[in-house]
Amino acid sequence: MSDVLLEVKDLKVYYPVKTKSIIPRKAYVKAVDGVSFQVHKKEAFGIVGESGCGKSTTGHTIVGLLKPTSGDILFEGESIVGEKVQHSKERAKKLQIIFQDPYSSLDSRFTVGRCIREPLDVHKIGTPAERNERAEELMREVGLNHEQITRYPHEFSGGQRQRIGIARALALNPSLIICDEPVSALDVSIQAQILNLMQELKEKHGLTYIFISHNLSVVHHLCDRIAVMYLGNVVEIADKRQLFDNPQHPYTKALLAAIPVPDPERPAMSGELEGDVPSPLHPPTGCCFHTRCKFAGPKCSAAKPPLVELEPGHQVACHLACGTMDDNA
């Protein structure tokens, strides 16, 4: 039996936009432009990249908050793209999400107990008394006092609110949780507490995570495998150790070089990347990264490199890394 829990195949998410040209024409922002990867059971799969690279859009599409333009998403071997409402509701029990902003993701009119209990109410699981008991149990599990269950979200700190969000995501005993930058809005010390909590819950319940972040240090702490995204494309996928010890894509190398090191005697990092991220409305031809890559050649602007496996578990989309730079475009 395959241990693949989720498979994303050539996923594209385009947003139509209005143009100011005299002759109206169709134009699209290519937020996600042909992303493919697999997530195995009980692993933490990281997706990293700069703001605007499409990582959150990918996560929201997987969980059903956005509709894909094309491509397929297989969960437990079955396609979940365009499935009927009743099937989608059943699937929601196994697919949950933790949002970036713990305050805006909680209804300020609800008590914390009701926020956590809401998934159980929607799916009509158990009696009202059993749902309340489950909410109290979840609060204790994420490190909160169950006596706080009658308070409202504004009475909690940011770290506590994110614990509430985690408890709500766990309510239905899901198989996969999409973590959309769950610690980016928190102080560093609180980030460590939340990450340690998520690691403990993963081991205790056999959870699978897709952890979305722009912080490679955070992803290194929690994830088993990591995908690097740039301008709507996956440019490298590797085991955590492979990615940090032997990065192959120039963009991955630049991200790793940008990680701050607490050493005052270390020389300041020289600028690895030049220019800005191109507009997803008018992405570059060929390799999406060639406009900022100091190794780019003629083929890079002419042909888009496929995601190639250089060694077991290590995939790269780069003509230079794959040795195809001098091939005819």
Image: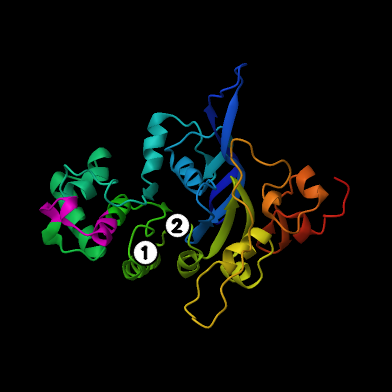
Q: From the top left corner, tell me how far across and down residue 66 is, in percent.
A: 45, 36
Q: From the top left corner, tell me how far across and down residue 63 is, in percent.
A: 43, 43
Q: Measured along the vertical axis of the image, is residue 270 above or below residue 63?
A: below
* Callout 2 amino acid: Tyr
Determine which residue is flagged by label 2.
209
Q: Measured along the vertical axis of the image, is residue 1 above or below residue 59?
A: below
Q: Give the extent of the magenta segment.
A: 149-164
Q: Could you tell me which residue is drawn at 81 percent across and 48 percent down? A: 299
Magenta portion: prevailing SS class: helix
- Please say whether residue 64 is one of the residues in the magenta stretch: no
Residue 303 sits in quarter: top right
First in residue order: circle 1 vs circle 2: 1
Q: Residue furthest top?
A: 23
Q: From the top left corner, tell me how far across and down residue 305 is, in percent.
A: 74, 49
Q: Secondary structure at mark 2?
A: strand
Image-based side of 189 in relation to 108, left or right = right
Image quarter hosting the C terminus: top right
Q: Secondary structure at mark 1?
A: helix
Determine which residue is flagged by label 1.
198
* Callout 1 amino acid: Met
Q: Nearer the viewer, residue 305 or 2?
A: 305
- Please say whether residue 153 is one of the residues in the magenta stretch: yes
Q: From the top left corner, tell me how far across and down residue 234 is, in percent.
A: 62, 51
User: Could you tell me how many numbered marks the image carries?
Assistant: 2
Is disc 1 in contact with disc 2, using a CB cutoff of under 8 Å? yes
